[in-house]
Image: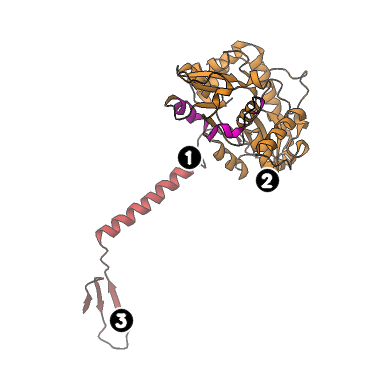
Amino acid sequence: MRFNGWPELKEAFLSEYLQAAFILAPMAMALREQGTPIRIVYLGHRDGTTMMVHKDSDAHRIKDLRGKKIAVPNRFSNQRLIIFRALKQRGMGIEDVTLLEMPPPDMPAALQVRAVDAVISGEPYPAQTEMDGYGRILFMTKDVWPEFISCVLAVHEKIIRAHRAQVQRLVEGIAKSGKWLDQRMGHRMQAADFVGKGYYHQHPALLRFVLSKPPDRVKYTNLRVLRKDFEEIETLGVESGILKGTAHFDDYADPSFVPEEDPIQPYNWEYTP
Amino acid sequence: MREDEEWGVRFAPTPHSFALALLVCERKVPTMRRLVLLVVIGWIVLVTVLHLWLNLHAFDVGPRYKDKAGLEFRVGYLPVT
């Protein structure tokens, strides 16, 4: 089920209307801290986040963001954490910028009219500003935080207990789909067509751009839930004040669904429109 | 027969003092009040139907995935990578 904003998806997930959700990693961790019995079982993708500024902006480096307004998807997002991390590495603090929470679909328009100075979000919204000619890449997360995690697959614990086989099928399906996507560029182009038309309701040309320019702009393999990745997010989350540090990897993650990479074979399928 | 001008109520007492009085009531509701009432009811119906359709998918047609145990597995997502 498609949502347009993180708060709405979170509420539907909390109410158990959704049995599972692709949700922001820090948001899932925060929900666990607050007592919601969910587990992160897999990742959605790696990388695939870009910070864009207006093409006429005077910001050409991360340091130039001082005093600027930046739109982030949610305070419980890794996009916020990467800003915190990047600023800290350059001797700056989060207080040196102004962060505004904004649904990703609203970000291109906000950047175009310069209501904000920069936007950072999962694709394809940053790419949309680039394709439309008014956005300029400040950085891609793959270049400042390699193997960046944005969205994770979270499932209610009682669904895991009662329907483990279905959850296992879901995880293996994502793994096989990811292998299929990353098998060759032709598959990515096919995915741009059927996902754009049937699921995202976005122009396939935009998704083709995201999935190919550059080819590693977003990756769909190596989606295992790894302790070191999440402990890094935990540390940054506590340091930046969005996490309390009361839930740890063994509380919010369940890597038991993660198949070994080698035996996973991609789907043997070709899309025909 | 007594008529109450404000309510338009007419009382038609029986000729017998101990008998039950027959009440013929004809309430005259001002036109504006009736209009407002109709608009409010119509608005509630409209919002309810929209909520059933958009949020609860009560009128969806087409296959919905259910596993053998009858669990409808709903997975939420935003259209972002």
Front residue (pair B20, A35): A35
Q: Which mark is residue A34?
A: 2
- Residue type at mark 3 is Ala
Query: Residue A65 location in percent, x, y?
Result: 55, 25
Query: Residue A202 location in percent, x, y?
Result: 49, 23
Mark 3, secondary structure of its residue = loop
- The chain displayed red equals B
Disc 2: host chain: A
Magenta region: which residues? A88-111
Q: Nearer the viewer, mark 2 or mark 3?
A: 2
- Residue type at mark 2 is Gln
Q: Quadrant of residue A186?
A: top right
Residue at 61%, 17% (x, y): give it: A217
Q: CA distance from mark 3 to mark 1?
A: 53 Å
Residue at 76%, 28% (x, y): give it: A228
| Residue for badge 3 | B21
Q: Nearer the viewer, mark 3 or mark 1?
A: 1
Q: Is residue A238 above or below residue B45?
A: above
- Residue type at mark 1 is Leu
Mark 2, secondary structure of its residue = loop
Disc 3: host chain: B
Q: Quadrant of the N terminus of chain A?
A: top right
Q: Nearer the viewer, mark 2 or mark 1?
A: 2
Confirm whether residue B67 shows in the render: no
Which tag, 3 or 1, sits closer to the chain's start? 3
- Chain A drawing hue: orange
| Residue for badge 1 | B54
Query: Residue A54 location in percent, x, y?
Result: 47, 21
Disc 1: host chain: B
Q: Is residue A91 left or right of residue A136?
A: right
Front residue (pair A17, B14): A17
